[in-house]
Amino acid sequence: MSSPPTTHDSRASTSSESTEKQNTDGVLERLFPTLATPVRRIGFWTAIVLPFLYVPLLVTGLSTATETGTFLVLLAVNLLALYVGHAHRQ
């Protein structure tokens, strides 16, 4: 008993990739077409470097409200940088 050969429609995958590309590159590119690439690049590298700033805070402990607030702000900025920089392709 053999199963029928499966076919792969390359048009379907190209279409979905194109739609995905439009979704990720949409708003920033439409609003600021000349700034989109540098903003995405900065977001990408910020998302990579920012976690190294967590280390001193976590080593000393989050014992004060200021340290805890600083950690939460760094975390929020990191999440924003991840969102902005996720479409950067290099």
Image (cartoon, rainbow, N blue to C red):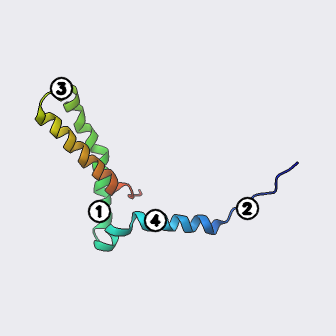
Labelled disc at residue 38: 1
Image coordinates for residue 14, horizontal then vertical, percent: 57, 67
Where is mark 3, residue-wise?
60
In primary-sequence order, the first of circles 2 and 3 is 2
With respect to residue 51, does 15 lie above or below? below
Q: CA distance from mark 1 to mark 4?
A: 17 Å
The type of residue carrying mark 2 is Thr
For the point 29% across and 62% down, which residue is it? 38
Amino acid of disc 3: Thr
| Neighbours of disc 1 within 10 Å: few (<14), some (14-19), many (20+) | few
Sequence-wise, the earlier of marks 1 and 4 is 4
The numbered mark, 1 or 3, whose residue comes first in the sequence reads 1
Q: Quadrant of the C terminus?
A: bottom left
The reply to whether dot 2 and dot 3 touch (C-beta < 8 Å) is no
Residues under numbered marks 3 and 4 in contact, where contact means CB atoms less than 8 Å apart: no
Q: Are marks 1 and 3 in contact (CB under 8 Å)?
A: no
Q: Residues within 10 Å of mark 3 (few under 14, many from 20)?
A: few
Count of picture labels? 4
| Labels 1 and 2: the sequence-earlier one | 2
**Closer to viewer: mark 1 or mark 2:** 2
Residue identified by numbered label 4: 21
Query: How far separated are the C-alphas under marks 4 and 2?
Result: 25 Å
Q: Is residue 22 left or right of residue 69?
A: right
Label 1 vs label 2: CA separation?
40 Å
Mark 4, Cα crowd under 10 Å, few <14 / some 14-19 / many 20+, is few
Residue 7's tag is 2
Circle 1 SS class: helix
Determine the secondary structure under disc 3: helix
Would you say residue 76 is visible in this rendering?
yes
Q: Residue at x 33, y 51 (%)?
A: 82
